[in-house]
Amino acid sequence: MVNLSVIFLVSKDADARRQYGVLRGMVVPLIGALVNLWLMSKLDINAFILGLIWLSIGLAQLAYLTRFFRREPPEVAFDESEPESAPASVKATL
C-alpha cells in the first residue's frame, strides 16, 4: 500500500516528482509493490484472510476518524515531551 501511495503522490505532485525523480519515485516503488504481491501470493489462505480482516478494521477506523473521508486524517506528533494532562502515576512510570 505504501508503494502505491508513493507512486500516486509522485504522479500527482510536481514537487515530489522533482524531488524523487522517475527512478526513486516510480520504478523503485513499482518493484516493491510487485515483490509484495508475489509475497502475498505465497501466503497461507488463513494468513491472507487475517490480513484482509486487519486491513478492513484499519480502514473502518480511518473512515470513522475522518467522518467517512470528509475530513483530514489526524496527525500523530512524535515528540519526546511528556503530555501535560497525564496523571502523576502515569508520569512516574514513564
Image (cartoon, helix red, strand yellow):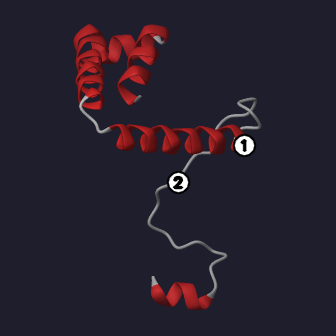
x 50%, y 45%: residue: 54
The percent position of residue 31, horizontal first and vertical second, equals 23, 17
Q: How many marks?
A: 2
The percent position of residue 40, horizontal first and vertical second, equals 30, 30
Question: Is 85 above or below relative to 21?
Answer: below
Question: Where on the picture, by quarter, is residue 65?
Answer: top right
The foreground one among 60 and 5 is 60
Quarter of the image with the C terminus is bottom left
Can you identify the residue that label 2 sits on? 77
Q: Is residue 78 left or right of residue 65?
A: left
Quarter of the image with the N terminus is top left
Q: CA distance from mark 2 to mark 1?
A: 20 Å
Q: Secondary structure under badge 1?
A: helix
Q: Is residue 56 left or right of residue 45?
A: right
Give the amino acid type for the residue marked by disc 1 in the picture. Answer: Tyr
Q: Give whichever of discs 2 and 1 has the lower sequence position.
A: 1
Q: Residues within 10 Å of mark 2 (few under 14, many from 20)?
A: few
The percent position of residue 93, horizontal first and vertical second, equals 46, 87
Q: Secondary structure under badge 2?
A: loop
Q: Residue furthest front?
A: 45
Question: Where on the picture, by quarter, is residue 60?
Answer: top right
x 64%, y 85%: residue: 87
Can you identify the residue that label 1 sits on? 64
The foreground one among 11 and 40 is 40
Q: Residues within 10 Å of mark 1 (few under 14, many from 20)?
A: few
Q: Closer to us: mark 2 or mark 1?
A: 1
Question: Where on the picture, by quarter, is residue 38?
Answer: top left
Give the amino acid type for the residue marked by disc 2 in the picture. Answer: Ala
Q: Is residue 11 left or right of residue 65?
A: left
State yes or no: discs 2 and 1 in contact (Cβ < 8 Å).
no
The percent position of residue 13, horizontal first and vertical second, equals 48, 12
